[in-house]
Image: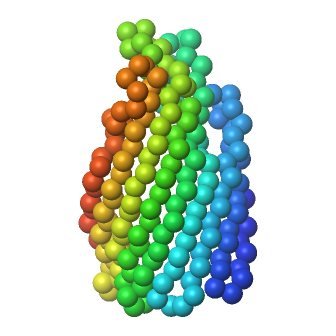
Amino acid sequence: YVDQAFKFGAWDIRTGVRLERDDLTDESLVSPRFRANWQPGTQVRYFATAGLFHQSPRFLDLAANAANTLENEEITHTSVGVEYFFNTRWSVLTEAYHQDLDNLVVDQDRVSGTFANIGDGTSKGVDVVLKGTIHEGLYATATYSWNDAEIDRKDGRGTVADEFSREHVATLGVTWEI
């Protein structure tokens, strides 16, 4: 992975590329990334990201049938967001994102265990993260995420909700460093 940061006053721009070799699928993959931050003062930071990501197929899908020659799935990701700093210890971040999902692995025949990279879809959502320092070494995080993910398995049903998508997710966490 190569990453380069460029700083221009209140701007922080990063470009990068990830090169990887997946011997399981016999693929060499290139994943470019871009991020821009603009923090005009101490209370607000605006940001945008874009990138191409790859997800290796599950080993079980590859091993289910000797005829399965699967490739990595592709995710094209874009996002915009804002982070507000209440003070030096607490902030809230809100980020909206959109992902185009391509080359998705779908099951063609569960009986024979055949899979193919013929699916596509979209995922979009909003994440809200409240994070802060309670005391030095003790940190808190609260998150809420809304997600709408739909995929087309090319099985004649058209676009359907992704089976692993959860529309609403909330978490609370505390980290104690000792």
Residue 175 visible (yes or no):
no
Residue 170, given in percent of the width and then of the height, sits at: 27, 60
In this rendering, the answer to whether 73 lies above or below 36 is above
Residue positioned most to the top? 112
* Quadrant position of residue 30: top right
For the residue pair 133 and 80, the one nearer the viewer reads as: 80
Residue visible at 32% across and 65% down in the picture: 143
In this rendering, the answer to whether 128 lies above or below 97 is below
Residue 18 visible (yes or no):
yes
Say left or right for 62 vs 135: right
Q: Quadrant of the C terminus?
A: bottom left
Say left or right for 53 vs 106: right
Residue 142, given in percent of the width and then of the height, sits at: 30, 69
Q: Quadrant of the N terminus?
A: bottom right
Residue visible at 57% across and 67% down in the picture: 48
* Quadrant position of residue 66: top right
Residue visible at 44% across and 30% down in the picture: 152
Residue 134, given in percent of the width and then of the height, sits at: 30, 84
In this rendering, the answer to whether 87 lies above or below 148 is below
Residue 166, given in percent of the width and then of the height, sits at: 30, 46
Say left or right for 96 vs 145: right
